[in-house]
Image (cartoon, rainbow, N blue to C red):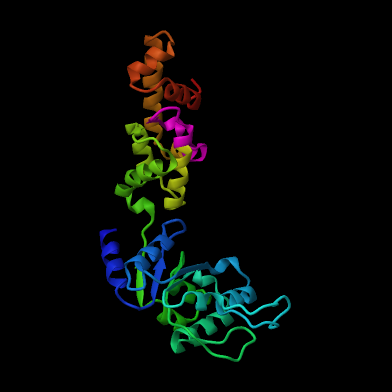
Amino acid sequence: MHKLFETICKAAKTDASIYISGETGVGKELVAKAIHAQSLRADQPFIAVNVANFSSDLLESQLFGHKKGAFTGAHNNSKGLLNAAENGTLFLDEVTCLASNTQAKLLRVLQEKQYYPVGDVQLQSFSACVISASNLSLEDAIKQQQFREDLRYRLEVIPLLVPPLRERKDDIILLFEYFLSQASTREHWIIEPDLQNRLINYSWPGNIRELENCAKFTAAMSNSGQLELSNLPDSIQTALKKDIPEQLISDEVKKITQALIQNCSNKTKTAKQLGISRMTLWRKMKTHNL
């Protein structure tokens, strides 16, 4: 991540096109915003558009703008997002979803720094910096015949890869604590070591977006400032159970059973002896059908 931050700082000082790749939820748009914020264009607009949200025709109208009467429903002139970006930054998310005809038009924009609004014959100039992103590498998109190779070299002058959260385990607790602070006015949270270990060892298929959602849910489920395993979303608890080796499960069952016998099934005393909360003990007993 330090290497990525260094590259972001260097890339922000240029007007070269930047391509950000990474799995869904890793924070590609946050990287784009960080580049814009550190660039000489920081006081200019940052315009973001997810191209996957539009049909081909509607996207062209959104990007290039259109002239009144260009198509059914075009009751007024529209300047489009290329114009709205002015001298700032245009961020194209999920760019590999662009239709082939739109790719050709975007290529011309990047080469000539000019474009025609839909239904217009008057050329418009384009001067914004372009940052694009996708969860698919452009190389793979080209191999799958989804993307033009010549457009790749216009968009991917500076490539950036944002690693998934499972490869950044040192960041997990730091980010979790940050999202907790955003989700609640509580100043201090106590995260049980058992919960910390589970957070670190979970695979996080939804990456930072999933971690943020988990932190908000966990904060809402806690009645105090102490967070336990029982506060995690059921989906994550279920996934974690699948990842626990059978030997560890067997050892835990044996440990809990012995403590229950020693304390005559008194759950309060058993939880205290095991060093966990009564709620955590109850959840473990339910999980292991004790």
Foreground of the two, 148 or 16? 16
Q: Which residues are magenta?
A: 219-239
Q: From where the camera sits, is residue 93 visible?
A: no
User: Which is nearer the eye, 85 or 211?
Assistant: 85
Quarter where residue 7 is shown: bottom left
The image position of residue 105, as x and y in percent, is: 54, 84
Give the x, y percent position of residue 203: 41, 47
Q: Nearer the viewer, residue 236 or 160?
A: 160
Q: Is residue 67 above or below residue 246?
A: below
Left or right of 272, for residue 58 = right
Is residue 232 or residue 287 the one in the foreground?
Answer: 232
Residue 180: x and y, percent?
Answer: 40, 41
Judged left or right of residue 9, residue 155 is right
**Which residue lies at the image location 41% right of the left edge and 74% below the top edge?**
88
What residue is drawn where x is 35% and y is 65%? 37
Quadrant, the N terminus: bottom left
Q: Residue most toward the right?
A: 72
| Residue that appears at 48% across and 76% down | 142
* Residue 184 appearing in the image: yes
